[in-house]
Amino acid sequence: MLRISKLTDYGIVLLARFAAEPPGTTLNAREMSEATGLPLPVVSKMLKTLAGAELLRSQRGAKGGYHLMRAPEAVTVAELLDALEGGVALMDCTAGPGHCEQEQNCNVREPWQRINRAVLGALETVTLAELVQPNTPSNLIDIQLRADAPPSDAR
């Protein structure tokens, strides 16, 4: 089973919470922990990670906390996974040259790279804003149609 890590899941939950707030809303780790039900130490760690990835901006002071650096419509799920997981690579050979000992003799490398590009292309079409929108049938169809489109960047 292909699965993202629990910390990546938590990071996406936190970003979705920020996306559901009015633009520019600043929230601190304690508020985010209470709003999401996630443990405060995990929330603190993930907020720092997300700020380091330039998805959140930190603000010091009495009214300090974090806020989204860009509009939720401008952040793709592919970017989130890149920041939290280090990118999307379904197999070692899809991570780039030299990651697999068998790549010179492998006859399934090219198909797996094509599959990886398709998955990445689909993730590039879904935004953080869409993650927090209700799953209306028209929204799901739109996401599916865009997922069928070729990736914007053949990696």
Image (cartoon, rainbow, N blue to C red):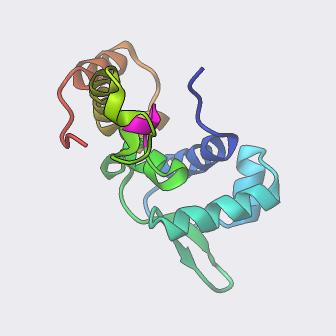
Q: Is residue 123 visible?
A: yes
Q: Nearer the viewer, residue 18 or 5?
A: 5
Quarter of the picture containing the N terminus is top right
Q: Position of residue 21 (x, y in %)?
A: 52, 52
Q: Quadrant of residue 33?
A: bottom right
55 sits left or right of 38 in the view? left
Q: Position of residue 94 (x, y in %)?
A: 37, 37
Q: Nearer the viewer, residue 44 or 155?
A: 155
Residue in view at x 53 percent, y 48 percent: 85
85 sits left or right of 61 in the view? left
Residue in view at x 21 percent, y 34 percent: 151
Q: Position of residue 65 (x, y in %)?
A: 62, 72
Above or below, 71 against 128 in this view is below
Region rendered in magenta: 88-93
Residue in view at x 44 percent, y 47 percent: 87
Q: Is residue 119 visible?
A: no
Residue in view at x 48 percent, y 65 percent: 53
